[in-house]
Amino acid sequence: MIEFEKLTLSNGLQVVVNRDEDTPLVTLNVMYRAGSRNELPEKTGLAHLLEHCMFTGTEKYPDYDEFVQSLYGENNAYTTTDITNYYITLPAEYIEEAFAIEADRMCNLPLFEEGVVAQRSVVMEEMKQTSLNKPYGDFYHLLRGLIYKKHNYRWPTIGLDINHIANATREDLLDFYHRYYTPDNAVVVVSGNVTSKEIFDLAERYFGGITTRCQPREIPSEPKQTERRELCVERDVPSSKVCLSYNIGTMTSRDFYISDLLTDILADGSSSLLPVALIRAKHLCVETNASVMDTMDPGFIMLTATANEDENADNANLLKDIEAELRNILLSLPERLTDYDFEKAKNRAVVSKTFQQIKTQDKATSLAMATLLGDTNLVNTDYEQFASVTTKEITDFINKIVVPDNECVLYYHKKA
């Protein structure tokens, strides 16, 4: 159980405090509802690029990292499809300084041209290393484009095209910053050895005077998929891969909890269903995985497998055979699933959630995300959601989603 107190300032900023007297540290977490879903199709990658530029300094704090380090702290940030998150962990006695620097970044970021130029180059190099010049780098990019036809989830957080980053201007970034980096579009969470009164007072003092309001763009809804989709590509990679994906609900829907548990049953550990069936028993694959996208808007569940082409060199239809096996394992899972495997998956989920309640940084991030989703107490009800999933729900869920007009298949062939 993560205990917390919450206050909403008059400008819309939500402030959450988790008191932890067992640590001398404190984490200040600032999360903005500003991810790649908030970009324009012709200007992607801005949310992530702006995250980098947030560390280029303000007039008051020209070197953000150096200032945090001078307080014996550490800091970082990340961007996803839905949010951008910033955090500082430092000794509790320096919490006011952390508030001062984050409030200053929220309203006074100058975006010096030289900083924009430098970070643009950094992000372009990152895109080359992670997506353009790396084996399988475009795998999930292609998958997103196959699953989504209208929604902004159809491009990855890093950006759809490197030219979008190369051509991003200071004005583009300032527009995104002023639209979304506002008190009413953010959550400030503090976890550590502090009191709620102390934090609420600091929040009012440093953030209370910021009056800008979020100006969100409309995000197109994704139409219901009505036909099976597939994409076949050939790339210079060590082995061929295949992916089956199915549309599900949002990360607060029952779909998500069922599918999260389902993917654990399928692929969490070497004794789970996919590796046992496809690697150890049939030698069709060298690697298998199953995962679910935790997104604010409807996401998807996916099963991936890397082909064992050494032992199946004479099989011209290997990816098709693996695809059929993946689908069959899903459809037959209710008959395969033992009580032991079911309880093992639930226990693993509970253990994972428990470990997320140890570090102040993890608690702060979880509280921030839950608050943005509309219910801070979601951090504590996850246990109940996972524990209450039944085998019948899993059966019904599989029968609902594993149908041709809800399926996307990506065949990722190794170049001959």
Image (spheres, helix red, strand yellow):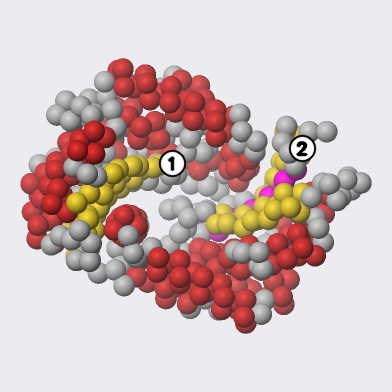
On screen, residue 306 versus residue 50, left or right, reads right
Q: Does the magenta stretch include residue 244?
A: yes
What x and y, as percent, mark residue 62?
20, 27
Q: Is the magenta stretch mostly helix, strand or loop?
A: strand
Question: Which residue corresponds to the image point at 73% horizontal and 39% vertical from the top-left?
Answer: 238
Q: Is residue 330 visible?
A: no
Question: Which residue corresponds to the image point at 77% horizontal and 37% vertical from the top-left?
Answer: 414
Q: Are marks 2 and 1 in contact (CB under 8 Å)?
A: no
The quadrant holding residue 376 is bottom left
Q: Can residue 88 be seen in this view?
A: yes
Residue 405 sits above or below residue 354 on the image: above
Identify the disc placed on residue 37. Answer: 1
Magenta residue span: 240-248
Residue in front for this viewpoint, 282 or 388: 282
Residue 355 sits above or below residue 26 on the image: below
Q: What is the number of callouts on the image?
A: 2
